[in-house]
Amino acid sequence: DGGITQSPKYLFRKEGQNVTLSCEQNLNHDAMYWYRQDPGQGLRLIYYSQIVNDFQKGDIAEGYSVSREKKESFPLTVTSAQKNPTAFYLCASSKTYGAGVVTDTQYFGPGTRLTVL
Amino acid sequence: AQSVAQPEDQVNVAEGNPLTVKCTYSVSGNPYLFWYVQYPNRGLQFLLKYITGDNLVKGSYGFEAEFNKSQTSFHLKKPSALVSDSALYFCAVRGARTGGYNKLIFGAGTRLAVHP
């Protein structure tokens, strides 16, 4: 988990509420990622960013939004449009090579568990 | 189609015995393979990776993995299991480049239980 922090560790959301999950890294990595983990399933990619001020949708982006204003930070907002947001959310980062063409090993933060009340 | 399969939901091993956690993959081109471990309510920790070179890759905490191209497998192994190895293990493969990105494709995970 070293070098990547996520906050809060636990988060509770009421129906119709937007919430923002924080992810910060001090590894000087260009690329950052958000994954969702549900019981019995592998990780599913929500959004990724390979450089500041640029990000791309992953496999399950609907109901989520991100920003990448700084290299170190990649916050994820879970909007009210996400109908089933209860899950464990993981942020990761990696080096890139060749002007962002190749991404190296991904390193993960400790996660945020989001529960809808 | 690019995919990773972990055929066992759970593996049970006695402490001190060797352990194997299985992984098979399907990807076009040369595979880049990874193993991660996850302890309860924690993020994933990187164990080891195969990119090229020796088929036997050594990683953290005494784990190793054997790449077998003909069987498209990348099984995780450890000669002597510890109770503290009990965790959820994920195999992953880096997929082909699409949309400017090589996606990391994860298996569903295998829960390893090491009994005293």
Image (cartoon, coloured by chain):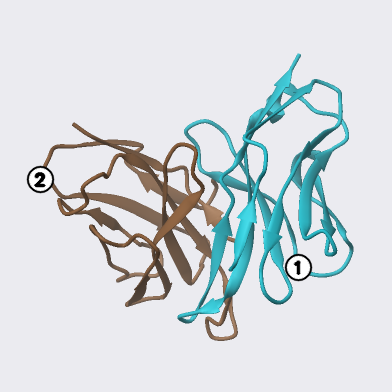
Chain colours: A brown, B cyan
Residues under labels 1 and 2: Cα distance? 45 Å
Q: Amino acid at mark 2?
A: Gly
Residue placed at 16% from the left, 54% from the top? A81
Q: Is residue A99 left or right of residue B18?
A: left
Residue B108 quadrant: top right
Residue placed at 81% from the left, 41% from the top? B77
Residue B51's disc number: 1
- The total of numbered circles placed on residues is 2
The residue under label 2 is A16
Q: Is residue B17 left or right of residue B97?
A: right
Residue placed at 76% from the left, 39% from the top? B61
> Which chain is disc 1 placed on?
B
Q: Amino acid at mark 1?
A: Ile
* Residue furthest out toward the left: A16
Asked if residue A104 can be seen in this view, the reply is: no
> Which chain is disc 2 placed on?
A
Q: Is residue A26 left or right of residue A112?
A: right
* Spot occupied by residue A53 in the image (x, y as percentages of width and height): 32, 77
Q: Is residue B56 left or right of residue A7?
A: right
| Image height of A100 relative to A74, above or below | below
* Residue furthest out toward the top: B116
**The C terminus of chain B: image quadrant:** top right
* Spot occupied by residue A82 in the image (x, y as percentages of width and height): 22, 51
Residue A77 or residue A26, whichever sits in front: A77
Label 1 SS? loop
| Image height of A31 relative to B38, above or below | below
Q: Are marks 1 and 2 on the same chain?
A: no
